[in-house]
Image (cartoon, rainbow, N blue to C red):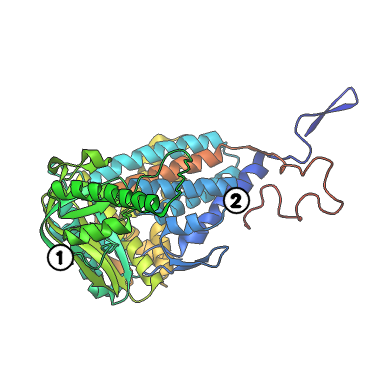
């Protein structure tokens, strides 16, 4: 970038930097964002397809979860990265609807491109989009259906909708039942749900039907010594965040031993110190020990003799859940061990699951922590099931918190599209064009659902519009029958927050990308001083700068 001044060029940017301006910059950004939306579009809905993602070391992920796909894809283009952020926000806020949010954002940009071609200024489009997004939130609040947290049938249908198309169809009933039971168990009286209280543990082996729920904690560890009891009834639990082993000196100390007697007395002293620690644990009355750090071999022997069930190297997150479930306090120093710090559980047992030992902590004093074991034939199946379960847990939690839902199957988008078109004509001016474009863009959801199910998208859209014209607000696309149907009656329902969040984050991302008219990319960092050997400089053509994605 240079400017001619009295015949002398003035360079502002560093050599090698690139600058794209005006329509070129907008075109590039919009194309990159559309490419991301197209990458996940085929996964939408119950008939969506899956993606196989292979990373640099050859690990394979098979999924149709929008945010997982976008996180695994190595995206370089800055505008495309903004689309990934839309999916991440959606995932953090609601847990489902990530593909919907990205597809809507891509379509909003595609419609904006048509308006830019007609010389509508980007700020006019941005203003119209913001108005439309605000109006859409009002309409959604109006068409939302209230639901009670005690209506388990509705909650089960919501988790079914979240799981449909995620490879969990075979045992959908069973898994949805587990999800609803888990969420309702940990839900507080005021309707808040802390998802961390539900632990999903995956085990390869058995079938999906073997998945089960444990009222309490599940820890993927085994007891440290075979001489310890396998089962403890009426457990008094000590949670220790300190090592049960010989304390080494902090500084590098040297101990000079000159005779065998001294060596023996040194070893005896070491054993006596460990014995003292174990005696403190026994004196507290604990019969179960969960230790976040290590347990020495000698300590294991003494603990086993005292018939204390001990587990070492327990994860910090598991220790926190154990503290919540059993009422125990985390003890960080051996000297602080006392019976006041102990927690209780009715039963602690070590059992084999798929050939591996696991510890079950059940009949807890505060059963606000539950665990779900997800089983499946292969690792990839179990991974995808876990993602489906996580999504379902999140949406059921969101509905219990918000107590509002909407019909699925593209029905709210069709209703919004029609109502926004009416709103556009009342606004007038140039903003009307942008609001109309926003309304048309929302129809991408029912259109994509139809395409993914192998149906004619135009026929389906016409049928849906006609149903909504007649006032059937919950009419959506029944992909199994290939026609418009009442989604509420069919049990295809979603939390209201899935839609409100998807539309607001999609609109924000689209507006942000539209407002960029200048992309200044710095050059890649130069090589070592003295320059690179000839022929080594720079990058291969087409690799540098902004070209991370094909579009």
On the question of residue 129 being in view, the answer is: yes
Q: Earlier in the sequence, mark 2 or mark 1?
A: 2
Label 1: which residue? Answer: 231
- Left or right: residue 308 versus residue 433 is left
Q: Residue at x 43, y 39 (%)?
A: 250
On the question of residue 403 being in view, the answer is: no
Q: Badge 2 local density, few (<14 within 10 Å), some, or many (20+)?
A: some
Please say if 418 is above or below 455.
above
Assign the C terminus to one quadrant of the image.
Answer: bottom right
- Left or right: residue 378 versus residue 118 is left
Secondary structure category for the residue under label 2: loop
Are the two marked residues, 2 and 1, in contact with CB atoms closer than 8 angstroms?
no
Percent of width and height locating residue 153: 14, 61
Percent of width and height locating residue 467: 28, 60
Camera-side mark, 2 or 1: 1
Q: Residue at x 37, y 62 (%)?
A: 462
Of the pair 468 and 349, the residue shown nearer to us: 349
Label 2: which residue? Answer: 76
């Amino acid at each position: 970038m240079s400017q001619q001044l009295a015949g002398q060029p003035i360079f502002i940017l560093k050599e090698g930097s690139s600058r794209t301006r005006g329509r070129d910059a907008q075109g590039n950004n919009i194309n990159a964002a559309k490419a991301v939306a197209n990458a996940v579009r085929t996964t939408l809905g119950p008939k969506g397809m899956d993606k196989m993602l292979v990373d640099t070391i050859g690990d394979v992920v098979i999924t149709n979860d929008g945010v997982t796909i976008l996180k695994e894809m190595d995206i370089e283009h800055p505008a495309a990265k903004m689309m990934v952020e839309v999916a991440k926000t959606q995932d953090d806020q609601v847990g489902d609807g990530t593909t919907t949010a990205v597809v809507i954002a891509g379509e909003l940009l595609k419609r904006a491109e048509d308006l830019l071609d007609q010389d509508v200024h980007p700020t006019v489009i941005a203003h119209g989009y913001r108005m439309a997004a605000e109006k859409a939130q009002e309409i959604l609040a109006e068409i939302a259906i209230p639901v009670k947290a005690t209506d388990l049938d509705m909650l089960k249908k919501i988790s079914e909708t979240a799981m449909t198309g995620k490879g969990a169809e075979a045992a959908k009933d069973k898994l949805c039942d587990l999800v609803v039971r888990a969420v309702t168990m940990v839900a507080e009286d005021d309707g808040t749900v802390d998802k961390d209280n539900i632990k999903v543990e995956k085990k390869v082996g058995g079938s999906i039907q073997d998945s089960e729920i444990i009222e309490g904690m599940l820890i993927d560890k085994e007891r440290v010594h075979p001489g310890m009891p396998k089962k403890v009834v009426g457990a008094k639990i000590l949670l220790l965040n300190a090592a049960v082993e010989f304390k080494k000196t902090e500084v590098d100390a040297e101990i000079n031993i000159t005779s065998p007697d001294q060596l023996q007395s040194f070893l005896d002293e070491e054993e006596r110190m460990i014995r003292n620690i174990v005696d403190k644990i026994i004196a507290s009355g604990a019969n179960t020990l969960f230790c976040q750090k290590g347990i020495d071999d000698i300590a294991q022997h003494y603990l086993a003799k005292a018939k204390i069930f001990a587990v070492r190297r327990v994860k910090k997150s598991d220790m926190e859940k154990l503290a919540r479930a059993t009422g125990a306090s985390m003890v960080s120093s051996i000297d602080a061990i006392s019976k006041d710090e102990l927690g209780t559980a009715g039963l602690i047992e070590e059992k084999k699951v798929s050939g591996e030992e696991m510890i079950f902590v059940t009949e807890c004093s505060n059963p606000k922590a539950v665990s779900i074991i997800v089983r499946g034939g292969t690792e990839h199946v179990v991974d995808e099931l876990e993602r489906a379960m996580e999504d379902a847990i999140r949406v059921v939690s969101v509905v219990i918190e918000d107590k509002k839902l909407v019909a699925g199957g593209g029905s709210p988008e069709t209703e919004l599209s029609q109502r926004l078109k009416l709103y556009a004509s009342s606004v007038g001016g140039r903003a009307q064009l942008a609001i109309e474009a926003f309304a048309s863009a929302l129809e991408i959801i029912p259109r994509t659902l139809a395409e993914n199910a192998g149906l004619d998208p135009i026929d389906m859209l016409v049928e849906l519009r006609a149903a909504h014209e007649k006032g059937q607000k919950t009419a959506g696309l029944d992909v199994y029958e290939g026609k418009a149907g009442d989604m509420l009656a069919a049990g295809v329902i979603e939390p209201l927050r899935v839609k409100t969040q998807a539309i607001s984050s999609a609109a924000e991302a689209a507006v942000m990308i539209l407002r960029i008219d200048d992309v200044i990319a710095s050059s890649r960092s130069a090589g070592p001083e003295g320059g690179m050997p000839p022929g080594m400089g720079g990058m291969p053509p087409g690799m540098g700068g902004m070209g991370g994605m094909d579009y």
